[in-house]
Amino acid sequence: MELSEIRKIPHSVEAEQCVIGAVLVDPSCINQIADKLLPHSFYVEKYAQIYEIIFDMFLENRSIDFVTVLESVVSRGIFDEAEGKRVLYEMTQLVPSTSNVAEYAKIIEEKYSLRRLIEACGEITAMCYEQGLSAAEILDTAESLIYKIMQSKTNTSLTHIREAILQTYDRVHKLALDKNAFSGLQTRYEEIDYMLSGLGKGNLILIAARPGIGKTSFALNIAQNIALGDRDCVIAVFSLEMSNDELAGRMLSSQSGVDSMKLNRGEVSDDDWSSLAAAAGILSKTQIYFDDSAGVTVAQMKTKLRRLKKLDLIIVDYLQLMSGGGRYDSRAAEVGAISRALKLMAKEFDVPVIALSQLNRDIEKTKRPQLSNLRESGAIEQDADSIIFLWKPDEDEDEVKPALSVIKCDVAKNRHGPTGSFDLAWNASITRFTNIAKM
Protein backbone atom coordinates (compact mmCIF):
# COMPACT_ATOMS: atom_id res chain seq x y z
CA MET A 1 0.00 0.00 0.00
CA GLU A 2 1.13 3.55 -0.70
CA LEU A 3 1.91 5.83 2.24
CA SER A 4 -1.01 8.11 1.28
CA GLU A 5 -3.41 5.19 1.64
CA ILE A 6 -2.02 4.13 5.01
CA ARG A 7 -1.96 7.62 6.50
CA LYS A 8 -5.58 8.63 6.22
CA ILE A 9 -6.61 11.56 8.41
CA PRO A 10 -8.52 10.06 11.36
CA HIS A 11 -12.26 10.73 11.02
CA SER A 12 -15.59 8.93 10.81
CA VAL A 13 -18.08 10.24 8.25
CA GLU A 14 -20.64 7.71 9.47
CA ALA A 15 -20.42 8.85 13.12
CA GLU A 16 -20.76 12.51 12.10
CA GLN A 17 -23.80 11.73 9.95
CA CYS A 18 -25.40 9.60 12.69
CA VAL A 19 -25.01 12.29 15.38
CA ILE A 20 -26.80 14.87 13.23
CA GLY A 21 -29.36 12.32 12.08
CA ALA A 22 -30.09 11.22 15.66
CA VAL A 23 -30.78 14.80 16.76
CA LEU A 24 -33.07 15.36 13.76
CA VAL A 25 -35.01 12.17 14.62
CA ASP A 26 -35.07 12.87 18.37
CA PRO A 27 -34.13 16.48 19.30
CA SER A 28 -33.77 15.54 22.99
CA CYS A 29 -30.56 13.70 22.03
CA ILE A 30 -28.74 17.03 22.00
CA ASN A 31 -28.95 17.07 25.82
CA GLN A 32 -26.73 13.99 25.99
CA ILE A 33 -23.91 15.37 23.85
CA ALA A 34 -23.95 19.19 23.97
CA ASP A 35 -21.54 19.32 26.93
CA LYS A 36 -19.05 16.98 25.23
CA LEU A 37 -19.25 17.55 21.48
CA LEU A 38 -18.49 20.93 19.88
CA PRO A 39 -18.75 21.88 16.17
CA HIS A 40 -14.97 22.08 15.70
CA SER A 41 -14.70 18.35 16.51
CA PHE A 42 -16.27 17.46 13.16
CA TYR A 43 -13.97 16.70 10.25
CA VAL A 44 -16.37 17.23 7.30
CA GLU A 45 -16.76 21.00 7.06
CA LYS A 46 -20.40 21.00 5.95
CA TYR A 47 -21.35 18.59 8.73
CA ALA A 48 -19.57 20.87 11.22
CA GLN A 49 -21.67 23.78 9.91
CA ILE A 50 -24.90 21.80 10.27
CA TYR A 51 -24.03 20.75 13.81
CA GLU A 52 -23.12 24.36 14.63
CA ILE A 53 -26.65 25.38 13.57
CA ILE A 54 -28.11 22.70 15.86
CA PHE A 55 -25.74 23.71 18.67
CA ASP A 56 -26.71 27.39 18.37
CA MET A 57 -30.42 26.44 18.42
CA PHE A 58 -29.80 24.49 21.62
CA LEU A 59 -28.02 27.44 23.26
CA GLU A 60 -30.82 29.81 22.21
CA ASN A 61 -33.53 27.38 23.34
CA ARG A 62 -35.07 27.27 19.87
CA SER A 63 -36.99 24.33 18.43
CA ILE A 64 -34.79 21.74 16.73
CA ASP A 65 -36.37 19.61 14.01
CA PHE A 66 -35.98 18.72 10.35
CA VAL A 67 -37.78 21.85 9.10
CA THR A 68 -36.02 24.45 11.30
CA VAL A 69 -32.58 22.96 10.64
CA LEU A 70 -33.24 22.78 6.89
CA GLU A 71 -34.32 26.43 6.85
CA SER A 72 -31.08 27.52 8.56
CA VAL A 73 -28.94 25.28 6.32
CA VAL A 74 -30.44 26.90 3.22
CA SER A 75 -30.36 30.48 4.58
CA ARG A 76 -26.67 30.15 5.46
CA GLY A 77 -25.87 28.84 1.98
CA ILE A 78 -24.54 25.47 3.10
CA PHE A 79 -26.83 23.67 0.61
CA ASP A 80 -29.66 24.72 -1.67
CA GLU A 81 -33.11 23.51 -0.62
CA ALA A 82 -33.18 20.34 -2.74
CA GLU A 83 -29.67 19.27 -1.74
CA GLY A 84 -30.33 20.17 1.90
CA LYS A 85 -33.46 18.02 2.00
CA ARG A 86 -31.61 15.09 0.48
CA VAL A 87 -28.58 15.29 2.80
CA LEU A 88 -30.60 15.73 5.99
CA TYR A 89 -33.06 12.97 5.03
CA GLU A 90 -30.22 10.54 4.29
CA MET A 91 -28.72 11.30 7.70
CA THR A 92 -31.97 10.43 9.47
CA GLN A 93 -32.14 7.14 7.56
CA LEU A 94 -28.57 6.17 8.48
CA VAL A 95 -29.18 6.22 12.26
CA PRO A 96 -29.35 2.64 13.64
CA SER A 97 -30.61 3.86 17.03
CA THR A 98 -30.90 7.32 18.63
CA SER A 99 -30.07 5.72 21.99
CA ASN A 100 -26.48 5.32 20.77
CA VAL A 101 -25.95 9.03 20.10
CA ALA A 102 -23.45 9.37 22.98
CA GLU A 103 -21.33 6.58 21.47
CA TYR A 104 -21.37 8.26 18.06
CA ALA A 105 -20.26 11.52 19.70
CA LYS A 106 -17.47 9.66 21.52
CA ILE A 107 -16.16 8.34 18.19
CA ILE A 108 -16.09 11.87 16.75
CA GLU A 109 -14.22 13.20 19.80
CA GLU A 110 -11.73 10.33 19.63
CA LYS A 111 -10.94 11.05 15.99
CA TYR A 112 -10.66 14.77 16.75
CA SER A 113 -8.13 14.06 19.53
CA LEU A 114 -6.06 11.96 17.12
CA ARG A 115 -6.06 14.80 14.59
CA ARG A 116 -4.92 17.23 17.30
CA LEU A 117 -2.12 14.86 18.25
CA ILE A 118 -1.02 14.66 14.61
CA GLU A 119 -1.08 18.46 14.43
CA ALA A 120 0.93 18.78 17.65
CA CYS A 121 3.49 16.25 16.41
CA GLY A 122 3.78 18.26 13.19
CA GLU A 123 4.50 21.43 15.16
CA ILE A 124 7.08 19.64 17.28
CA THR A 125 8.75 18.13 14.21
CA ALA A 126 8.87 21.55 12.51
CA MET A 127 10.52 23.11 15.59
CA CYS A 128 13.12 20.35 15.63
CA TYR A 129 14.03 20.90 11.97
CA GLU A 130 14.11 24.70 12.33
CA GLN A 131 16.47 24.48 15.36
CA GLY A 132 15.43 27.94 16.47
CA LEU A 133 14.89 26.76 20.04
CA SER A 134 16.99 24.65 22.38
CA ALA A 135 16.08 20.99 22.89
CA ALA A 136 14.90 21.83 26.42
CA GLU A 137 12.58 24.57 25.13
CA ILE A 138 11.16 22.26 22.47
CA LEU A 139 10.53 19.58 25.11
CA ASP A 140 8.71 22.13 27.27
CA THR A 141 6.57 23.19 24.31
CA ALA A 142 5.84 19.56 23.41
CA GLU A 143 4.78 18.84 26.98
CA SER A 144 2.49 21.87 26.94
CA LEU A 145 0.86 20.90 23.63
CA ILE A 146 0.15 17.34 24.78
CA TYR A 147 -1.09 18.53 28.18
CA LYS A 148 -3.62 20.87 26.53
CA ILE A 149 -5.04 17.93 24.58
CA MET A 150 -5.26 15.86 27.76
CA GLN A 151 -6.97 18.69 29.65
CA SER A 152 -9.56 19.19 26.89
CA LYS A 153 -10.63 15.56 27.31
CA THR A 154 -11.24 15.99 31.04
CA ASN A 155 -14.92 16.51 31.70
CA THR A 156 -16.83 15.95 34.91
CA SER A 157 -20.57 16.04 35.39
CA LEU A 158 -22.56 17.91 38.02
CA THR A 159 -22.98 16.13 41.35
CA HIS A 160 -26.26 16.27 43.26
CA ILE A 161 -25.87 17.40 46.87
CA ARG A 162 -27.31 14.05 47.99
CA GLU A 163 -24.30 12.24 46.48
CA ALA A 164 -21.87 14.75 47.99
CA ILE A 165 -23.47 14.28 51.43
CA LEU A 166 -23.17 10.50 51.16
CA GLN A 167 -19.48 10.90 50.27
CA THR A 168 -19.00 13.18 53.29
CA TYR A 169 -20.76 10.73 55.62
CA ASP A 170 -18.58 7.92 54.30
CA ARG A 171 -15.40 9.95 54.83
CA VAL A 172 -16.38 11.02 58.37
CA HIS A 173 -17.39 7.46 59.28
CA LYS A 174 -14.04 6.07 58.11
CA LEU A 175 -12.18 8.81 59.98
CA ALA A 176 -14.12 8.00 63.14
CA LEU A 177 -12.99 4.38 62.89
CA ASP A 178 -9.44 5.19 61.77
CA LYS A 179 -8.06 8.72 62.11
CA ASN A 180 -5.58 8.09 59.29
CA ALA A 181 -8.07 6.54 56.86
CA PHE A 182 -8.89 9.55 54.72
CA SER A 183 -6.66 12.28 56.15
CA GLY A 184 -3.59 13.45 54.26
CA LEU A 185 -0.03 12.22 54.68
CA GLN A 186 1.07 12.50 58.31
CA THR A 187 4.21 14.61 58.78
CA ARG A 188 4.56 13.46 62.41
CA TYR A 189 4.66 17.12 63.45
CA GLU A 190 1.60 17.16 65.66
CA GLU A 191 0.46 20.77 65.23
CA ILE A 192 0.90 20.73 61.46
CA ASP A 193 -0.99 17.45 61.10
CA TYR A 194 -3.77 18.82 63.31
CA MET A 195 -4.14 22.14 61.47
CA LEU A 196 -3.74 20.79 57.93
CA SER A 197 -5.32 17.36 58.61
CA GLY A 198 -2.14 16.03 57.04
CA LEU A 199 -0.84 16.89 53.59
CA GLY A 200 -3.88 16.63 51.33
CA LYS A 201 -3.89 15.26 47.79
CA GLY A 202 -3.72 17.94 45.12
CA ASN A 203 -2.58 20.59 47.62
CA LEU A 204 0.33 22.99 47.19
CA ILE A 205 2.02 23.56 50.55
CA LEU A 206 4.55 26.38 50.72
CA ILE A 207 7.30 26.41 53.36
CA ALA A 208 9.04 29.78 53.45
CA ALA A 209 11.96 31.12 55.48
CA ARG A 210 15.07 33.24 55.26
CA PRO A 211 18.37 31.43 54.43
CA GLY A 212 19.89 29.44 57.27
CA ILE A 213 16.68 28.82 59.20
CA GLY A 214 16.45 25.19 58.12
CA LYS A 215 13.64 24.98 55.55
CA THR A 216 15.48 22.34 53.47
CA SER A 217 16.11 20.23 56.56
CA PHE A 218 12.47 20.64 57.60
CA ALA A 219 11.25 19.41 54.20
CA LEU A 220 13.67 16.46 54.32
CA ASN A 221 12.53 15.65 57.86
CA ILE A 222 8.92 15.57 56.62
CA ALA A 223 9.91 13.26 53.75
CA GLN A 224 11.82 11.05 56.17
CA ASN A 225 8.95 10.87 58.68
CA ILE A 226 6.40 9.99 56.01
CA ALA A 227 8.64 7.44 54.27
CA LEU A 228 9.55 5.69 57.53
CA GLY A 229 5.92 5.72 58.66
CA ASP A 230 4.81 3.99 55.47
CA ARG A 231 7.48 2.17 53.46
CA ASP A 232 5.15 2.08 50.42
CA CYS A 233 5.00 5.88 50.15
CA VAL A 234 6.92 7.14 47.11
CA ILE A 235 8.47 10.59 47.54
CA ALA A 236 10.27 12.63 44.88
CA VAL A 237 12.63 15.39 46.04
CA PHE A 238 13.79 17.96 43.49
CA SER A 239 16.72 19.96 44.86
CA LEU A 240 17.91 22.90 42.78
CA GLU A 241 20.39 24.06 45.43
CA MET A 242 21.95 20.95 46.97
CA SER A 243 23.41 17.81 45.40
CA ASN A 244 22.02 14.33 45.91
CA ASP A 245 25.08 13.56 48.04
CA GLU A 246 24.37 16.51 50.34
CA LEU A 247 20.70 15.55 50.68
CA ALA A 248 21.60 11.97 51.55
CA GLY A 249 24.19 13.24 54.03
CA ARG A 250 21.61 15.33 55.86
CA MET A 251 19.19 12.42 56.06
CA LEU A 252 21.92 10.12 57.34
CA SER A 253 22.88 12.64 60.00
CA SER A 254 19.28 13.11 61.06
CA GLN A 255 18.56 9.38 61.17
CA SER A 256 21.81 8.27 62.83
CA GLY A 257 22.32 11.16 65.23
CA VAL A 258 25.88 11.64 63.96
CA ASP A 259 26.91 15.30 63.82
CA SER A 260 26.64 16.59 60.23
CA MET A 261 29.92 18.53 60.58
CA LYS A 262 31.72 15.30 61.49
CA LEU A 263 30.32 13.74 58.32
CA ASN A 264 31.46 16.68 56.19
CA ARG A 265 34.97 16.54 57.65
CA GLY A 266 35.28 12.76 57.68
CA GLU A 267 35.82 12.79 61.47
CA VAL A 268 33.85 9.60 62.08
CA SER A 269 34.47 7.23 64.99
CA ASP A 270 33.86 3.49 65.01
CA ASP A 271 30.63 4.04 66.94
CA ASP A 272 29.58 6.66 64.37
CA TRP A 273 30.20 4.18 61.56
CA SER A 274 27.94 1.67 63.29
CA SER A 275 25.20 4.30 63.67
CA LEU A 276 25.58 5.38 60.05
CA ALA A 277 25.38 1.79 58.82
CA ALA A 278 22.17 1.21 60.78
CA ALA A 279 20.69 4.47 59.48
CA ALA A 280 21.70 3.66 55.90
CA GLY A 281 19.99 0.28 56.18
CA ILE A 282 16.76 1.88 57.36
CA LEU A 283 16.73 4.72 54.81
CA SER A 284 17.64 2.42 51.92
CA LYS A 285 14.35 0.58 52.41
CA THR A 286 12.30 3.75 51.88
CA GLN A 287 10.95 4.94 48.52
CA ILE A 288 12.64 8.36 48.37
CA TYR A 289 13.99 9.60 45.03
CA PHE A 290 16.34 12.58 44.54
CA ASP A 291 16.89 14.83 41.53
CA ASP A 292 19.49 17.61 41.73
CA SER A 293 19.10 19.04 38.21
CA ALA A 294 19.77 22.78 38.16
CA GLY A 295 17.16 25.18 36.73
CA VAL A 296 14.61 22.41 36.22
CA THR A 297 11.18 23.35 34.84
CA VAL A 298 7.82 21.97 35.93
CA ALA A 299 7.48 20.29 32.52
CA GLN A 300 10.79 18.47 33.06
CA MET A 301 9.69 17.43 36.55
CA LYS A 302 6.46 15.97 35.20
CA THR A 303 8.33 14.00 32.54
CA LYS A 304 10.52 12.43 35.22
CA LEU A 305 7.63 11.82 37.62
CA ARG A 306 5.65 9.93 35.00
CA ARG A 307 8.40 7.29 34.99
CA LEU A 308 7.47 6.39 38.57
CA LYS A 309 4.78 3.73 38.79
CA LYS A 310 3.47 5.26 42.04
CA LEU A 311 3.77 8.68 43.63
CA ASP A 312 2.64 10.07 47.00
CA LEU A 313 4.55 13.32 47.61
CA ILE A 314 6.63 15.85 45.66
CA ILE A 315 9.11 18.25 47.29
CA VAL A 316 10.68 21.16 45.41
CA ASP A 317 13.67 23.04 46.91
CA TYR A 318 13.28 25.80 46.08
CA LEU A 319 10.79 27.75 43.97
CA GLN A 320 12.89 30.82 43.13
CA LEU A 321 15.65 28.68 41.59
CA MET A 322 13.28 27.08 39.09
CA SER A 323 12.96 28.07 35.44
CA GLY A 324 9.62 28.86 33.84
CA GLY A 325 10.79 27.44 30.53
CA GLY A 326 9.52 30.41 28.53
CA ARG A 327 9.82 34.16 28.02
CA TYR A 328 8.38 36.47 30.68
CA ASP A 329 8.19 40.23 31.17
CA SER A 330 9.67 39.98 34.65
CA ARG A 331 11.05 37.49 37.13
CA ALA A 332 7.95 38.02 39.29
CA ALA A 333 5.76 36.98 36.34
CA GLU A 334 7.93 33.90 35.81
CA VAL A 335 7.77 32.87 39.48
CA GLY A 336 3.99 33.38 39.37
CA ALA A 337 3.76 31.09 36.34
CA ILE A 338 5.90 28.50 38.14
CA SER A 339 3.71 28.52 41.26
CA ARG A 340 0.57 28.07 39.15
CA ALA A 341 2.24 25.20 37.29
CA LEU A 342 3.17 23.55 40.60
CA LYS A 343 -0.45 23.77 41.77
CA LEU A 344 -1.64 22.24 38.49
CA MET A 345 0.98 19.50 38.87
CA ALA A 346 -0.35 18.69 42.35
CA LYS A 347 -3.85 18.32 40.90
CA GLU A 348 -2.70 16.35 37.86
CA PHE A 349 -0.76 13.77 39.92
CA ASP A 350 -3.28 13.97 42.79
CA VAL A 351 -0.53 14.25 45.42
CA PRO A 352 0.61 17.03 47.78
CA VAL A 353 3.44 19.23 46.55
CA ILE A 354 5.70 20.92 49.10
CA ALA A 355 7.51 23.90 47.58
CA LEU A 356 10.15 25.81 49.51
CA SER A 357 10.42 29.56 49.06
CA GLN A 358 12.69 32.41 50.05
CA LEU A 359 11.44 35.48 51.91
CA ASN A 360 12.46 38.99 50.93
CA ARG A 361 14.71 41.18 53.08
CA ASP A 362 11.79 43.21 54.44
CA ILE A 363 11.45 40.53 57.12
CA GLU A 364 14.59 41.92 58.77
CA LYS A 365 12.49 44.93 59.85
CA THR A 366 9.58 42.97 61.32
CA LYS A 367 11.41 39.71 62.28
CA ARG A 368 8.15 37.75 62.10
CA PRO A 369 7.26 36.75 58.49
CA GLN A 370 4.14 38.07 56.80
CA LEU A 371 2.48 36.91 53.57
CA SER A 372 3.79 40.11 51.97
CA ASN A 373 7.34 38.85 52.60
CA LEU A 374 7.03 36.09 49.99
CA ARG A 375 9.78 36.84 47.52
CA GLU A 376 9.18 37.96 43.91
CA SER A 377 5.52 37.13 43.43
CA GLY A 378 2.17 37.75 45.10
CA ALA A 379 0.79 34.94 42.93
CA ILE A 380 2.50 32.42 45.23
CA GLU A 381 0.14 33.42 48.04
CA GLN A 382 -2.90 32.90 45.80
CA ASP A 383 -1.82 29.51 44.42
CA ALA A 384 -0.77 27.89 47.69
CA ASP A 385 -3.35 25.96 49.71
CA SER A 386 -1.22 26.29 52.85
CA ILE A 387 1.71 28.55 53.73
CA ILE A 388 4.06 27.76 56.60
CA PHE A 389 6.68 30.22 57.84
CA LEU A 390 9.77 29.19 59.80
CA TRP A 391 11.56 31.90 61.77
CA LYS A 392 13.89 32.30 64.70
CA PRO A 393 12.81 34.57 67.56
CA ASP A 394 15.18 36.58 69.73
CA GLU A 395 16.55 34.14 72.29
CA ASP A 396 17.54 34.29 75.90
CA GLU A 397 20.71 32.18 75.97
CA ASP A 398 19.96 30.98 79.52
CA GLU A 399 16.68 29.40 78.39
CA VAL A 400 18.07 27.48 75.41
CA LYS A 401 19.74 24.11 75.78
CA PRO A 402 23.22 23.73 74.27
CA ALA A 403 23.19 22.80 70.56
CA LEU A 404 19.41 23.14 70.53
CA SER A 405 17.19 26.08 69.66
CA VAL A 406 13.55 26.92 69.18
CA ILE A 407 12.17 27.67 65.74
CA LYS A 408 8.78 29.31 65.38
CA CYS A 409 6.42 27.66 62.93
CA ASP A 410 3.54 29.81 61.69
CA VAL A 411 0.73 28.35 59.60
CA ALA A 412 -0.14 31.68 57.98
CA LYS A 413 -2.60 30.36 55.39
CA ASN A 414 -4.72 27.24 55.43
CA ARG A 415 -7.60 26.70 53.02
CA HIS A 416 -8.75 23.61 54.89
CA GLY A 417 -8.56 24.59 58.54
CA PRO A 418 -7.21 26.96 61.19
CA THR A 419 -4.05 29.04 61.18
CA GLY A 420 -1.77 29.43 64.14
CA SER A 421 1.73 29.41 65.56
CA PHE A 422 3.72 26.87 67.55
CA ASP A 423 7.31 26.00 68.44
CA LEU A 424 9.56 23.26 67.08
CA ALA A 425 12.85 22.08 68.54
CA TRP A 426 15.77 22.45 66.11
CA ASN A 427 18.96 20.46 66.52
CA ALA A 428 21.33 22.04 64.00
CA SER A 429 24.11 19.51 64.59
CA ILE A 430 22.02 16.68 63.14
CA THR A 431 19.70 18.87 61.01
CA ARG A 432 16.62 17.59 62.82
CA PHE A 433 13.31 19.22 63.79
CA THR A 434 11.23 17.58 66.53
CA ASN A 435 8.00 18.31 68.34
CA ILE A 436 8.75 20.62 71.27
CA ALA A 437 7.42 18.07 73.77
CA LYS A 438 10.23 15.73 72.71
CA MET A 439 12.95 18.36 73.20
Image (cartoon, rainbow, N blue to C red):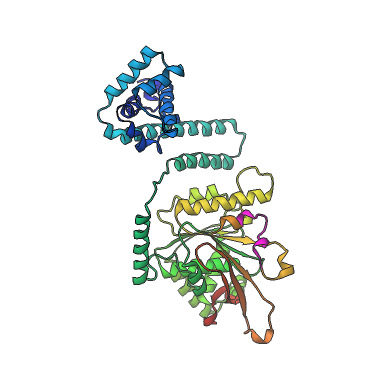
Q: Residue at x 62, y 51 (%)?
A: 336
What residue occupies the far left of the structure in this picture? 96
* Residue 13: quarter of image: top left
Quadrant containing the N terminus is top left
> Residue 314: image x %, image y %?
50, 58
Q: In the picture, which quadrant includes the C terminus?
A: bottom right
* Residue occupying the point 70% across, 61% down: 360
Q: Is residue 121 above or below residue 291?
A: above
Whether residue 129 is visible here, answered yes or no, is yes
Magenta span contains residue 375: yes
Q: Nearer the viewer, residue 59 or 198?
A: 59
210 and 411: which is toward the camera: 411
Q: Is residue 49 left or right of residue 217?
A: left
Residue occupying the far right of the picture: 365
Q: How many marks?
A: 0
Quadrant housing residue 326: top right
- What are the residue bounds of the magenta stretch? 369-380
- Spot occupied by residue 373 in the image (x, y as percentages of width and height): 68, 62
Question: Is residue 103 one of those drawn in magenta?
Answer: no
Picture layout, residue 434 above or below residue 329: below
Residue 267 appearing in the image: no
Q: Position of residue 394 (x, y in %)?
A: 69, 78
Up-down relation of residue 409 to residue 170 (above or below): below
Q: Position of residue 33 (x, y in %)?
A: 37, 36
- In the image, 243 versus 341, the foreground residue is 341
